[in-house]
Amino acid sequence: MIAEVTEEVRKIQLTGRSSYIISLPKKWILEMGLKAGDRLTFLKQNDSTLLLTPPKMKKREKPEEVTIFVSSHDNPYTIMRRIIAFYLVGYNLIRLKTKEDRMDSMQRSIVKDGARRKLVGTEVVSDSSNEMALQVLLSYPELSIESALRRMCIIATSMHEDAMKSLEQLNHQLAKEVIGMDDEVDRFSFYAIRQLKSAVQSERIIKEIGLNDARDCLGYRLVTKSVERIADHAADICENILMMKTPPSQSLFTRIFKMSSFSRSIFEGAFESLFKKDYERADQVIEKARAIELLEKEALAQVSRQKLGAEEISCLRLIIESLHRVTEYSSDVAEIVLNLTVSEAPS
């Protein structure tokens, strides 16, 4: 059954010399449980409409607290995933409680470590034998979407640079350090998703996190995912390096490094276009990215000329594939920039 949509018209009235007033429908006032003297919040939307919010509905914009009941039989990683889910939808206080005498030590350790490594702005504010509380202390204006993305980009770029150094020298210790850096990208990714989920429901939060309107939220959600995947591919490259026993020849490394430098230039160009809201720059990045196909063929041809074992060849091919994917994800970001800035593009 389709709900009936009713439209009411009210006249603007002038009271005194400078104040304008407008009456509100009695039915709406009663439904909202409002009375004379109550306050309403007015917010001007981008389309010039006004949003009226009663105090009790404004409080719903940001869920405050949730409690998770756990037992000693619960998988600690399942508990951590649930905490992350509540963090992403905007809860500011997440409590863990057990009806048993004590919370399992493994659960407690994994939750503390996961909060530290995965959740930006989150601290353990209470920790007793049968209860733990995680508090999100960072508010929206303190770290905008752009700031979070910039941080993710810096880390992802550093990961790829170190991955190439690790490949050239077959430095397994450096490869392990790069893999560990992926957690830092995930932290900012979760924070950005948390912001965007909240912003979709509130025009006020959209402004606070540095976006223009709700349409931007989907675009920035896809951008965040692309950066996360780009960092994942740097980690994947290092996972393959850990399985290699001998470094690549200088001629082969030169081909792979050339491909890596190219993919990094596409990545940096895509995000330059995003931060500058530059439609033409994004279009140039997409066109330039097509050259990755030739660079990949050259690198694969060099691999085939090497006298290497099957496992080494497989690892090198996967490394080359990861560099190709980095270019594709960067091109995807540039396409999103086109969609976000097309109305401002020169005709």
Image (cartoon, rainbow, N blue to C red):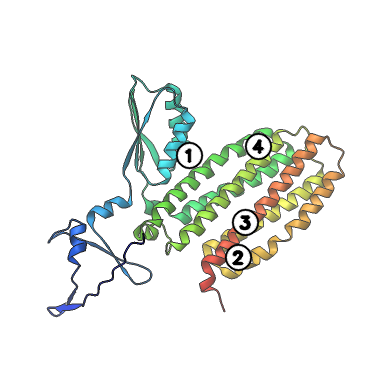
Residue at disc 4, secondary structure: helix
Q: Position of residue 274 (x, y in %)?
A: 54, 62
Name the N-terminal-most of marks 3 and 1: 1
* Front-lying residue, 171 or 228: 228
Q: Distance of mark 4 from mark 3, alpha carbons?
A: 23 Å
Q: Residues within 10 Å of mark 3 (few under 14, many from 20)?
A: many
Q: Quadrant of the C terminus?
A: bottom right
CB under 8 Å between discs 4 and 3: no
The residue carrying mark 4 is 175
Q: Identify the residue at image location x=84%, y=47%.
A: 302
Mark seen at residue 118: 1
- What type is the residue that disc 4 sits on? Ala
Q: Identify the residue at image location x=39%, y=24%.
A: 71
Residue 264 visible to the viewer: no
The vertical placement of 127 against 121, above or below, is above
- What type is the residue that disc 3 sits on? Ser
Query: In screen coordinates, is 343 left or right of 29?
Result: right
CB under 8 Å between discs 2 and 1: no
Q: Nearer the observer, disc 4 or disc 3?
A: 3
The residue carrying mark 3 is 330
The residue carrying mark 2 is 282
Q: Distance of mark 2 from mark 3, alpha carbons?
A: 10 Å
Residue at disc 1, secondary structure: helix
Q: Distance of mark 2 from mark 4, alpha carbons?
A: 32 Å
Residue at disc 3, secondary structure: helix
